[in-house]
Amino acid sequence: MKKLLSLSIAAALGGILFGQPAGAADNDGQALVKQGEYLAVAGDCAACHTAPGGKPFAGGLAINTPIGNIISTNITPSETAGIGRYSLTDFERAIRQGIRRDGAHLYPAMPYTSYAVITDSDMKALYAYFMQGVAPVDVRPQTTALPFPFNLRFSMAVWDSLYARAAPFVADAGHSAEWNRGAYLVQGLAHCSTCHTPRNFLMAEQSGQALAGASLGTWFAPNITPDKQAGIGQWSAGDIASYLQTGRSPTGSQAGGPMLEAIDKSFSKLSAADIHAIVTYLQGVKPQSANAPPGRLAATQPLISDVGLMNGSASQGGRLYAEHCSTCHQVSGQGSHGLPALYNNAAFRRPVADNAVMAILDGLTPASGQAMPAFRTVMNDQQVATLVNYLFKNDGDAGVRTTPERVNTLRNGGAPSPLLAIAKGGMIALLVVVIVLVIGGGILKSRRRQR
């Protein structure tokens, strides 16, 4: 309240000194806060910085990464637990460079490598919103505790020197204003490459493979370039726009996992103009052929009857489907009452089966529309693998299969990063070297005493 009062007094004084009515200054300030609120939605800030059942932007969400859980921070204007003491310069440094007010480095789970392109004017609007439009929460979340050596935040300075950037977006004069707006959103605030670009063993985005698809540990973010086999080259502009606005596309795609959350909390709230700008940009990026599915699709929809179920001759996959899926998706998988058809569904035309497995394990809960229940506690790993392989064979790409072992890995949060093994091996090697040096030093001392 004191901060808002002081801002109002400052606005009034500014009006007196510079000939601008105080009311006009207040209106400008409110407009800036409103602009910042829209930008925060475009940046999907709430998704990471609001824990389930928690207060907006108060942090505390455990973000699963291949090197351990990273706990999101409080970014409310609290002076004791949040960013209330941040100046605009401090705020900008954290957003663009991943460096906190105290000089500590952030982990790139915070997509500062993408946010670096945010323009100066938008940065001021974001700062105004977080300082004036967000309620302070004086509760500090649990501290992130990654295993050694990743708990040494200063090591991120080396990573940043290799992979971070700090240059605001500059429009390309060779493209339209709509394309440039889309580029700004996709490359920056929407940080699409964070999920959809494959990463190297140091967990940095691979240059030259922008938006070619990548595993997120559990869910798989597909290729979203205009390649016709591997990407979304066969989608119309309307198909892409519909998917971003509703989570569904006429192509048979339904969003799940992190993408469903991004649509519910961010893309669905963007203006139609911004959605079309994103579509324009995506349709114009360089096609990438990586992560194309095998392409073993059935020529016609299989005719699945319940005869086999009645006489007991159905496969184990067929029986699991009849027991857990047919009520909603119908015996032949054609869907009904707004529920999607499974035949030729995009979920079964991916290069890997991970998304289908995750949808079965955790279900799908869109902000609007019917939810799919979770079967995590209903089916074991073998049953999930059997059902998923049955669905790919009958309704999608028969060249894709999963295993009970893979289901178990996904059930438990995905495979750990090779960096953990490398770090552990390095620690063991260092310990061996230290032991050898200590023993060697002891032997030398003993020999000197004998002399």
Image: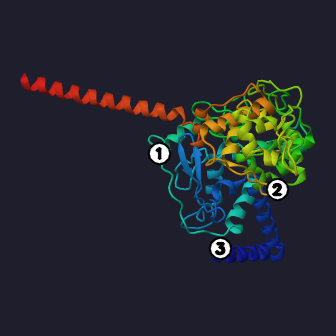
What's under tag 3, amino acid-wise? Lys
- When asked about the image quadrant of residue 389, the answer is top right
Q: Which mark is residue 335?
A: none
Q: Mark 3 or mark 2, which is nearer the start of the sequence?
A: 3
Give coordinates of residue 84: x percent, y percent: 60, 65
What's under tag 1, amino acid-wise? Asn
Mark in the foreground, 2 or 3: 2
What's under tag 2, amino acid-wise? Gly
In this rendered view, identify the residue nearer to me: 352 or 46.
352
> Label 1: which residue?
151
For the residues marked 2 and 3, what is the alpha-carbon distance in whole angstroms?
41 Å
For the residues marked 3 and 1, what is the alpha-carbon distance in whole angstroms?
35 Å
Mark in the foreground, 3 or 1: 1
Q: Is residue 131 visible?
A: yes
Q: Which mark is residue 369?
A: 2
Give coordinates of residue 256: x percent, y percent: 74, 46
Q: Which mark is residue 3?
A: 3
For mark 3, does the 10 Å Cα neighbourhood hold few (<14), some (14 to 19), or many (20 or more) residues?
few
SS label for mark 1: loop
Tell me if 59 is positioned left or right of 116 in this view.
left
